[in-house]
Image: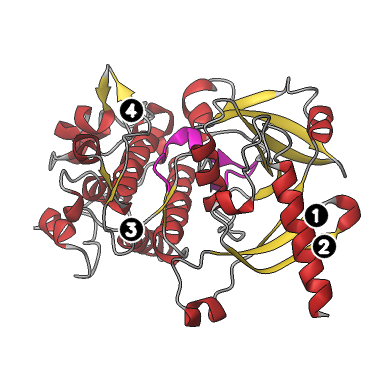
Amino acid sequence: MIVVLLAIFIVVFKAFKKASQNDNGNDLGAGSIDIHSYRTAQLANPGGNSLEVDIIDIRTHTVEELNSLEVGIDIRTYTMDELKNATDNFTTKVGQGASGFVYRAKLPGNRLGAVKRATNLDTDLFKQELSVLLRLPHHPQLVDLIGLCLQADERILVFEFISSGSLYDRLHKNKGLTSPLSWATRIDIAFQVAVALQYLHEEAKPPILHRDVKSANVLLEDDNRAKLADFGLSKLGPKDNQFTNTAVRGSIGYMDPQYMKTHRFSAKSDVYSFGVLLLELMTGLKSLHEDTPLAEWTQTYRFSEDIDIFMTIVDRNMMDHINTMELQNMIKVVNLCLRDLSEERSSMREIVNMMQETRNLKANGNLSDGGEAPLLGNGNLSDGAQCLHH
């Protein structure tokens, strides 16, 4: 039995290595994709090139953690010919990620997929993204990786296809073509993205920093369920909201100003980007408005004690359906995310708890229109959150 398992491991390793050599002979195999050890490696279906692996980074786990860790995904390797056929020779472009273009694909078995083909051939960036993706199990608010292709010098990832496109398109490109998103739907979308970020920051092992949270990277199902996508800039992050030094990469208008000045990124930088995204949902404005970052442009409105002042910039497409007390609470959440100093911002766990509390109040009929919104947090907020309430 041991001999059989060893033989299977060798076959899988060689397959990755062979598929990953570029024209210059540089090895881009499993080791260089930051896969340092397999707990299991087996060909689940040799005829279909299905590969099932458990990914363990032995540099970041103790022996006890390795024995208890349960991390695994099921992915399929595709040939270049298969993906050319599936995408009509890469003519079905539907979007662009941080490291390449995305194409709609009709995969074997009539399954739809989204094929992301790296265009800049930044090997380190691709290895970084793949290293992150291979550590992610299925999560309802994250887009699933279902396959890859590493033939020759190609760097291709295959994801599940999300039917209704990006939140950015829905908010800004498709006005008049589709019905506007309601207030309740927008808050639900924001909540789902918050849950995804909380998972990445606090439950993934090791923690993951997304580094490119924006409406273009939030994909919507037909029922407006949201999934966070594009891990092209993501990094395996330090624990406990510590900083990691990195070159400034991201999207203008969403990036944490403190990170832009210091080149030091933390989970609180993702929190800042989420605050911009929530503000974008509430106002219907882009992250850059009149050549000014939306967070900066809205300061006067956000900090006003008169809710009617903020109402002047709320998206007119949903004015008749807003619960003003819920709006007040969401403004508080936005302001907690957009604090100048990262240590004064709430964590994504605190943000999720505050948003869930508002949802519970509304569901129980305790969040009626008019009057002042109930205090959020029950005293469990960070110092930055507390100072906003007093």
Q: Secondary structure at mark 4?
A: loop
Sequence-first tag of 1 and 4: 1
Q: Which residues are magenta?
A: 210-228
Which residue occupies the foreground of this view, 48 or 230?
48
User: What residue appears at the point 34 percent right and 32 percent down from the top-left corner?
Assistant: 283
* Element assignment for label 1: strand
Determine which of the numbered discs, if any, sits on residue 252 in the image: 4
Q: Identify the disc placed on residue 367.
A: 3
Q: Which of 183/136 is in front?
A: 136
**Of all residues shown, which one is farthest toward the right?**
47
Earlier along the polypeptide chain: callout 2 or callout 3?
2
Q: Compare marks 1 and 3 and give the one earlier in the sequence.
A: 1
Residue 280 on image: x %, y %: 36, 34
Q: Are marks 1 and 2 in contact (CB under 8 Å)?
A: yes
Amino acid type, callout 2: Ala
| Front residue (pair 231, 30) | 30
Which of the 4 image quarters holds residue 347? bottom left
Q: Which label's residue is closer to the chain start, 4 or 3? A: 4
- The C terminus, quarter of image: bottom left
What's the mark number on residue 50? 1
Q: Are marks 4 and 2 in contact (CB under 8 Å)?
A: no
Q: Specify the quadrant of the image occupied by residue 81.
A: top right
For disc 2, the marked residue is 44
Horizontal arrangement in the rendering, residue 246 relative to residue 98 (left or right): left
**Residue 302 appears at what percent x and percent y?**
19, 38
Disc 3 secondary structure class? loop
Mark closer to the observer (2, 3)? 2
Please state which amino acid type lies under the numbered disc 1: Ser
Mark positioned earlier in the residue sequence (1 or 2):
2
Spatial CA distance of label 4 from label 2 is 43 Å
Magenta run includes residue 237: no
> In the picture shown, does residue 353 fall above or below 153?
below
